[in-house]
Amino acid sequence: MLLRLRLILGSLVGGVLLLLLLCLGAQNLDKRPQLNLLVGRSAPLPVGFVVGLALVIGVISGGCAAALVSPAAQQIDD
């Protein structure tokens, strides 16, 4: 259980730090295309921000998936 908690917490902290760096780096970009969604269009976002956001979501979901499939700690009964 402790291993799973550490994996989830590590992936969340890593994802938040990557998101912070991404937001700081995407401040002064000139090209801001819009995404075509099914319902409408998104706000103008830099391409690097969209790719970086996908990376951050992948880090968080990958860490949570690794925590879910990790084997349970076996207790030693004497």
Image: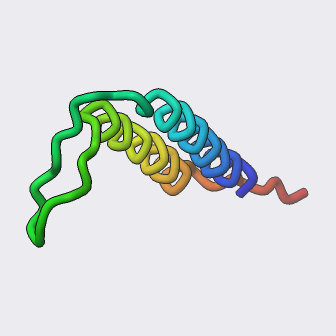
Q: Is 18 situated above or below 75?
A: above
- Horizontal side of 67 relative to 75 (left or right) equals left
- Horizontal side of 15 relative to 37 (left or right) equals right
Q: How is the image coloured?
A: rainbow
The quadrant the C terminus occupies is bottom right
The quadrant the N terminus occupies is bottom right
Q: Is 5 situated above or below 17?
A: below
Residue 30, image x, y percentages: 27, 28
**Looking at the image, which residue sits at the far right?**
78
Residue 58, image x, y percentages: 38, 43
**Looking at the image, which residue sits at the far bottom?**
39
- Horizontal side of 11 relative to 59 (left or right) equals right
Q: Quadrant of residue 39?
A: bottom left
Closer to us: 1 or 42 = 42
Residue at (85% x, 59% y) in the render: 77
Residue 70, image x, y percentages: 55, 49
Residue 6, image x, y percentages: 70, 46
Q: How many numbered marks are there? A: 0
Residue at (66% x, 49% y) in the render: 9
Closer to us: 69 or 78 = 69
Residue at (14% x, 60% y) in the render: 41
Residue at (40% x, 28% y) in the render: 28
Q: Is 74 situated above or below 52?
A: below
